[in-house]
Amino acid sequence: MSELNIALTAVGGLVLVIGLFSGAIRRSTLSEPLVALLAGILLGPAVLGLLDPAGWGSQETILEQAARLTLAISLMGVALRLPKREPFRGWQSLTVLLGLVMPLMWLVSGLLVYLTLGVPFFVALLVGAVVTPTDPVVSSTIVTGELAEENLPNRLRYTLSGESGANDGLAYPFVLLPILLLSRPPGEALSHWLTHTLLWEVGAAVVFGALVGYGAGWLLERAQGAGTMEKTSFLAYTIALSLAVLGSAKLLGTDGVLAVFVAGLAFDAAVSESDRAEEERVQEAVNRFFILPIFVLLGLAIPWEGWMELGWAGLLLALAVLLLRRLPAVLALKPLLGRVGGTRDALFLGWFGPIGVAALFYANLAVREAGVEEAWVVGSLVICASILAHGLSATPLTRLYERRAQNDETRE
């Protein structure tokens, strides 16, 4: 009970403090996830020893489910933040990022793990899949707020938001394929992956999310028209939609994370602009409360001994993943990226593909389903490296982007 009270005090106090200084934090070289991560490390067994998640039950289950809930809330916020027609306006760049860049990110990450750590090839592919998705939680701290709105063009902010929202759920088949190959004969694994994972778990998630999301939006509009719903119900409505879709999609055996994002887009298409603006405000307000605790939890659960066993190879791998997983692929394919195909946009998109809560979710899923501990040890190291690198570089590089844009306009 004392640990629960300490956790409530720490998390509640942290949210209060970050809320009071959120503007200053975003204008500094710090980021909210980094502050929360450091708070978790401070409170955890490695420093003060006030909180130890190892004594709370199955750490893998706690981390996996906490990350899953955080993703659901965050993905709904991302979907509501995107303009209604944004997926259609940005179809070319999103298609390239999801259809070409994402598979390359998986293969490059897996190859780096294989060459650096010398683990079996399918294990390397699994770890590579864990760190593939661009995280919507960390991305939101980069592309939202006054600093981002003043210095980054909408096309760039919306593209990164849309990609990070979609590829979290689309990372699921990349994770499942090596899990199946590790546990079944190759032919059986591929057959199950094609017919069950892709067609049902992914395909049905898209259809289910679209139907439920649009239906929820339609019902909201009817309730508004009939005067049976108060404005104060908006917050509960979107949170309930996020959680209902997440749970029901899982009960149907589909990809719940992808279903939530699709439901958010469909809901967004069904509601009026005034309702949409209200939903966006309340959803973004609640995001902070749900997002920060997961990074505190990560700080508490860091596998320090596992990191030490990796040694310099682990640090080299983390650095290589951050530099090579995404940036070369985006630069190589920038002629195909449409409206974000300029060099400056491609460099920003290529660097800011942060690794965070989605990787935390898939890392613990991999441990539970395949018993691959490397997924958690390596995954947590790369996540923390990404939070540090992308958190510290977000503000200066955002300002640099705007300065370069102004210089280019002056030359013209």
Image (cartoon, rainbow, N blue to C red):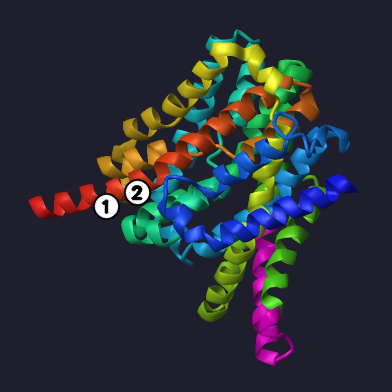
Q: In x, y percent, where is residue 46? A: 71, 28
Residue 230 located within the stretch drawn in magenta: yes
State the residue position of label 1.
402
Of all residues, the one furthest to the left in this rendering is: 411
Q: Are marks 1 and 2 in contact (CB under 8 Å)?
A: yes
Of all residues, the one furthest to the bottom in this rendering is: 227
Of all residues, the one furthest to the front in this rendering is: 48
Q: Main secondary structure of the magenta part?
A: helix
Real-space Cα distance between discs 1 and 2? 7 Å
Number of marks present in the image shown? 2
What residue is at 55 percent from the left and 74 percent from the top? 276
Under circle 1, the secondary element is helix
Q: Disc 2 marks which amino acid?
A: Thr
In-front residue for pair 6/222: 6
Task: From this view, report whether residue 232 is shown above or below residue 200.
Answer: below
Task: From this view, report whether residue 193 is shown above or below residue 135.
Answer: above
What residue is at 73 percent from the left and 28 percent from the top? 366
Magenta part of the chain = 206-232
Q: Disc 1 marks which amino acid?
A: Glu
Of all residues, the one furthest to the right in this rendering is: 1
Task: From this view, report whether residue 300 is shown above or below residue 23.
Answer: above
In-front residue for pair 72/101: 72
What residue is at 48 percent from the left and 38 percent from the top? 99
What residue is at 72 percent from the left and 24 percent from the top? 179
**Location of residue 20 (image quadrant):** bottom right
Residue 289 located within the stretch drawn in magenta: no
Residue 217 seen from this side: yes
Q: In x, y percent, where is residue 321? A: 49, 25
341 on left or right of 2: left
Under circle 2, the secondary element is helix
Picture disc at residue 398: 2
